Amino acid sequence: MRRRNIGYGIFLTGLFFLISTVTTSAFSQEKEKFVVVLDAGHGGHDSGNRGNGYKEKEIALNVVLSVGATLEKDPRFKVVYTRKTDEFIELHERGRIANKANADLFVSVHCNSHRSQAYGTETFVLGLHANDENFNVAKNENSVILLEDNYEANYDGFDPNSPESIIGLTLMQEEYLDQSLTLASFVQNRFKKSLERKSRGVKQAGFVVLHQTYMPSVLIELGFLTNNSEGKYLNSKKGQDDMAKSITTSIVDYKESLDAIYFVPKPETPQEAGNVTAEMEGDKVYEDITFKVQIAAGSTDIELQPFNFNGLDQLSKIKIGDLYKYYFGSTPNYTLIQELKEIAVGKGFDSSFVVAFRNNESIPLTDALKANTSSN
């Protein structure tokens, strides 16, 4: 996972005012539902890439509609679409839809292309390009603005072909970067473990559509339509259903990982028929057990802020005698806690390990794993 870039260029002063006026409290207890905006890339006269004759716009829409249909069955979620049909939506309008909905999450779905038989999934968050490859991916997706009427005014002279134009994009998403990286990691881990897709990792690049939003946001590249095997898979109903289920589970995992930290109320009838669960095949959820990732221990009382823990933001601690123990994540889902451990290791906490609690009391992990479970 690439670390955030610190050196940013000059950005439009007026946008600072927008940051202060937008009220997107993703974890507010006053919000009854967790609002997810699903964005199917391209559409209408913009077909996206046409690798092997497939249409990116159709595949992205099919996956998004499938994700949305499942989330809509869960009373905890409200789903908003930037498009539900084959229509052209300008990039700045996609961001406006998300901001107007006061969304908690923005997920944009695309398909990749390359001159070679490259393959694999990758998930992007907004940031400066670490290399030419990331820039080229962003350039391809950003070039859609050239199809828009009056794009110079809508994007204040932004040039999708200019690396310099990207520098200003990163600032607006800076405060949401850590959360975006967490979701992106969930998405990539699910693709790799549950679907056995090749993961090309979590990356940062300057996507205009992400720049327009004021909430945690990711752009998912499902794979390469230009790859003969992967393109055929993504164009199939099975492939689209698989990818949609994996993305849905990642979104639910992300929300539930926040619930334990921010105490977002869950529905009174969580077992209601049709509710989405955070599990996929092979997941194990333990009744009356809470798993956490222990990331550090010491005699110093450290404030639970992301900047003190390399960007991790789902933090807790306990004091035992003179010793403080610091934890990342909190969930009864053992599969999910293993994914959170990988995220912690990726953030530099190489000696992280999973611990277990019952009724807020620490118990041996081996005892916890012998407890009753519910699994698919």
Image (spheres, rainbow, N blue to C red):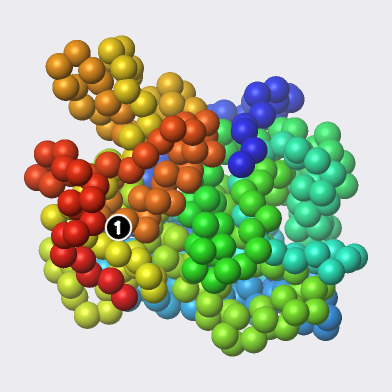
> Mark 1 is on which residue type?
Asn
- Which residue is drawn at the image coordinates 18% and 51% (left, top)? 367
Residue linked to disc 1: 333
- Residue 77 position (above or below residue 288): below
Residue at the spot 53% in from the left edge and 80% down from the top edge:
241
When the figure is inspected, residue 179 is found, relative to residue 94, above or below; the finding is above
Give the percent coordinates (x, y) of residue 158: 80, 43
Residue 9 placement: quadrant: top right
Secondary structure, mark 1, is loop
Q: Residue furthest bottom?
A: 237
Residue at x 49%, y 28% (from the top left corner): 310
Q: Position of residue 16 (x, y in %)?
A: 57, 28
Q: Residue furthest front?
A: 366
| Residue at image point 77% right, 47% down | 134
Q: Is residue 104 visible?
A: no
Residue 363 sits in quarter: top left
Q: Please provide percent x and percent y for residue 88.
A: 69, 71
Q: Could you classify mark 1 by the number of other residues whose Cα lies within 10 Å: few (under 14), some (14-19), or many (20 or more)?
A: many
Left or right of 219? Residue 303 is: left
81 displayed left or right of 151: left
Query: Taking 255 as reference, is 295 above or below it?
Result: above
Question: Which one is nearer the viewer's eye here, 221 or 362?
Answer: 362
Q: Is residue 83 above or below residue 205?
A: below
Quadrant placement of the N terminus: top right
| Residue sitting farthest toward the left | 359
